[in-house]
């Protein structure tokens, strides 16, 4: 009987340790926008993200430059594949990550000076900021019903009842 109980307690401890380590890593990586700028090279390896930025920048600047949007898209895509392009897009990636996890309330914009750097043409500097379509997840819904956390509030113990769980209203 004691061996079975000890085994069960060790199993529960191992699961709790795995949840704590997973929560710590998630907090460190997914909900920390200070690191997302450093990861711009890695993020821009994703074809979908790179294509989205190139499409938005190309469509916004092609008419001003008097060239086909495909030409600008290809230029921005080529730039995004390089280390220099990743450094230029560092702020765009950071803003998009902040918007995605709900820390950035406004739209993600590519400003005129950023467009100049991306297209390598001064003529687009006077254009208004271009909005990059990024949707926010907002609050994170975990397993416990009614438990809503802001992205910065996630901790390994978030699944346990505590101050983050809304309490029932007290009767008058």
Image (cartoon, grey):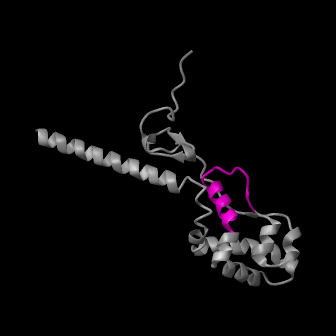
Residue 115 visible: yes
Residue 51 visible: no
Residue appearing at x 64%, y 49% in the figure: 103
Q: Residue furthest left?
A: 1
Residue appearing at x 65%, y 57% in the figure: 135
Location of residue 60 with respect to 33 vertically, above or below = below
- The stretch of residues the image draws in magenta is 89-109
Q: Residue furthest top?
A: 172
Location of residue 111 with respect to 166 vertically, above or below = below
Percent x, y of residue 42? 56, 70
141 left or right, relative to 7: right
11 left or right, relative to 100: left
Percent x, y of residue 161? 43, 34
* Residue 101 falls within the magenta-colored stretch: yes
151 left or right, relative to 135: left
Quadrant position of the C terminus in the picture:
top right
Percent x, y of residue 85? 68, 75
Q: For residue 159, what is the image quadrant?
A: top left
Location of residue 80 with respect to 17 vertically, above or below = below
Residue appearing at x 47%, y 45% in the figure: 142
Quadrant position of the N terminus in the picture:
top left
């Amino acid at each position: 009987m004691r061996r079975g109980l000890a085994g069960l307690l060790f199993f529960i401890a191992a699961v709790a340790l795995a949840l704590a380590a997973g929560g710590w890593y998630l907090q460190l990586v997914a909900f920390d926008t200070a690191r997302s700028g450093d990861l711009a090279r890695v993020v821009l390896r994703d074809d979908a993200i790179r294509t989205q930025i190139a499409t938005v920048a190309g469509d916004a600047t092609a008419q001003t430059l008097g060239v086909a949007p495909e030409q600008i898209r290809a230029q921005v895509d080529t730039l995004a594949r390089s280390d220099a392009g990743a450094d230029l897009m560092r702020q765009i990636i950071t803003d998009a990550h902040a918007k995605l996890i709900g820390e950035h309330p406004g739209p993600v914009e590519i400003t005129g000076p950023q467009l100049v750097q991306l297209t390598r043409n001064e003529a687009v500097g006077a254009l208004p900021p271009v909005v990059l379509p990024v949707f926010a997840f907002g609050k994170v819904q975990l397993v416990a019903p009614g438990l809503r956390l802001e992205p910065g509030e996630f901790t390994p113990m978030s699944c346990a009842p505590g101050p983050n769980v809304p309490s029932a209203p007290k009767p008058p």
